[in-house]
C-alpha cells in the first residue's frame, strides 16, 4: 500500500517509492534492523516515509539515491547486511567506532562509486573480502581495530587511487602482498599490530607518495629493503617489535636518519643477510623500472 503523501514532499516520496530509491530504502531498513536501530544514538526519521536524505546520517543526490552514510560512533550493534551492496550510488561510508560484529559482506565490492569505506574500531571478524579489489574509485579504506583474520588480499593492489590504507590492529596473518607496491597514490599504510610474517617486499619502494609506514608488532623477519631509501616523502616509519634488521647500506642508513619519526628495532643485520638477491641496487626505487611510473 502506497504511503499517504505528506504536503511539501510529494515528489520526494515518489522517487522513494519507485525504482532504485526504493531499493536504497530497503537496504537502509536492513541496516537498521540488523544493527539495533531502535537503540542508535541518532535515528531521526529512520523507517518513516520522509525522504531518505532526511534520515539521520544519510545523504542523497538530487534523484534520491543514497550517496553517503555517516553513522560513526552511533551504537550500531550487530551485523552488516548484504543488502548494503545494493546502494550502488554510495560514495562514502563511515561506520567507524561502533559494535559491528560478524563478517564484512563481499557484496560491498559492488559499490563501484565508493571512494571511502570506514569500518575501523568495531569487532568485525573473518577475512577481508577480495571483492574490495573491484572498488576502482576507492581513496580510503579503514578496517583497523577489528578482529579480522586471514591474509591481506593481493587484489587490494588494484586500487591505484588509494591514498589511505589502515589494516592495523587485527589478527591478519601471512605475508605482505608485493601487489601493494602498485598503490602509486598511497600516502598512509598501516599494517601494525597484526600477525604478519615473512619479509617486507621490496615493491613497497615503489610507493613514491608514501608518508607513513606502520609495520610494528608483527612477526616480520629479514632486512629492511634497500628500495625504501628511494621514498623521498616518507617521514614516519615504525617497525618496533618485529624481527626486521637494518642492512649495512650507507644510502639506507642515511635515509633512516633523515626521517622525522623512526621507531625501529635497532638491530643490524648479521653479515651475509644484509639483503636478498632481489634487493640489491637494481631494486632501488627511482631506476625507471617500478610500477608507478618512476
Image (tube, grey):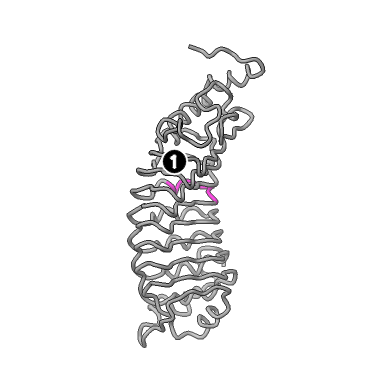
Q: Compare residues 186 and 267 and report the one nearer the observer.
A: 267
Q: From which residue to which does the magenta span run?
A: 132-139
Q: Is residue 130 left or right of residue 9?
A: left
The correct choice, above or below, for 140 with respect to 101 in the image is below
The correct choice, above or below, for 247 with respect to 156 in the image is below
Residue 211 x, y percent position in the rendering: 56, 66
Residue 8 x, y percent position in the rendering: 67, 18
Specify whether residue 162 is painted magenta. Answer: no
In percent of the image, x 40 and y 75: which residue is there? 278
In percent of the image, x 39 and y 75: which residue is there? 244
Residue 178 x, y percent position in the rendering: 41, 63
Residue, far right: 8
- Specify the quadrant that holds the C terminus: bottom right
Q: Which quarter of the figure has residue 10?
A: top right
Q: Is residue 189 left or right of residue 193?
A: right
Q: Compare residues 269 and 47 and report the one nearer the observer.
A: 47
Specify whether residue 135 is painted magenta. Answer: yes
Q: Compare residues 187 and 72 and report the one nearer the observer.
A: 72
> 10 Å neighbourhood of mark 1: few (<14), some, or many (≥20)?
many
Magenta span main SS: loop
Q: Which residue is mark 1?
A: 108
The correct choice, above or below, for 9 with respect to 203 in the image is above
The correct choice, above or below, for 112 with respect to 204 in the image is above
Residue, far bottom: 271
Q: Is residue 272 left or right of residue 49?
A: left
Circle 1: element type: helix
Residue 274 x, y percent position in the rendering: 40, 83
In percent of the image, x 47 and y 84: which residue is there? 249
Amino acid at each position: 500500500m502506497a504511503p499517504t503523501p505528506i504536503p511539501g514532499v510529494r515528489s520526494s516520496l515518489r522517487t522513494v517509492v519507485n525504482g532504485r530509491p526504493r531499493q536504497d530504502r530497503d537496504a537502509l531498513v536492513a541496516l537498521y534492523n540488523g544493527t539495533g536501530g531502535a537503540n542508535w544514538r541518532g535515528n531521526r526519521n529512520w523507517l518513516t516515509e520522509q525522504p531518505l536524505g532526511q534520515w539521520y546520517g544519510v545523504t542523497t543526490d538530487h534523484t534520491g539515491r543514497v550517496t553517503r552514510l555517516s553513522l560513526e560512533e552511533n551504537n550500531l550493534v550487530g551485523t552488516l547486511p548484504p543488502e548494503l551492496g545494493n546502494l550502488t550510488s554510495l560514495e562514502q561510508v563511515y561506520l567507524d567506532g561502533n559494535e559491528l560484529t560478524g563478517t564484512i559482506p563481499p557484496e560491498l565490492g559492488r559499490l563501484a562509486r565508493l571512494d571511502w569505506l570506514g569500518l575501523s574500531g568495531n569487532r568485525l571478524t573473518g577475512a577481508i573480502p577480495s571483492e574490495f579489489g573491484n572498488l576502482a574509485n576507492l581513496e580510503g579504506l579503514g578496517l583497523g581495530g577489528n578482529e579480522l583474520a586471514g591474509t591481506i588480499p593481493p587484489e587490494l593492489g588494484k586500487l591505484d587511487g588509494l591514498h589511505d590504507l589502515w589494516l592495523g590492529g587485527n589478527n591478519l596473518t601471512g605475508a605482505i602482498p608485493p601487489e601493494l607496491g602498485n598503490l602509486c597514490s598511497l600516502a598512509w599504510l598501516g599494517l601494525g599490530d597484526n600477525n604478519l610474517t615473512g619479509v617486507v617486499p621490496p615493491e613497497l619502494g615503489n610507493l613514491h607518495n608514501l608518508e607513513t609506514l606502520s609495520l610494528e608488532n608483527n612477526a616480520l623477519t629479514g632486512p629492511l629493503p634497500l628500495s625504501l631509501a628511494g621514498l623521498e616523502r616518507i617521514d614516519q616509519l615504525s617497525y618496533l617489535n618485529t624481527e626486521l634488521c637494518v642492512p649495512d647500506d650507507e644510502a639506507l642508513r642515511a635515509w633512516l636518519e633523515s626521517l622525522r619519526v623512526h621507531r625501529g628495532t635497532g638491530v643490524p643485520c648479521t653479515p651475509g643477510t644484509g639483503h636478498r638477491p632481489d634487493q640489491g641496487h637494481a631494486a632501488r626505487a627511482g631506476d625507471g623500472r617500478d610500477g608507478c611510473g618512476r
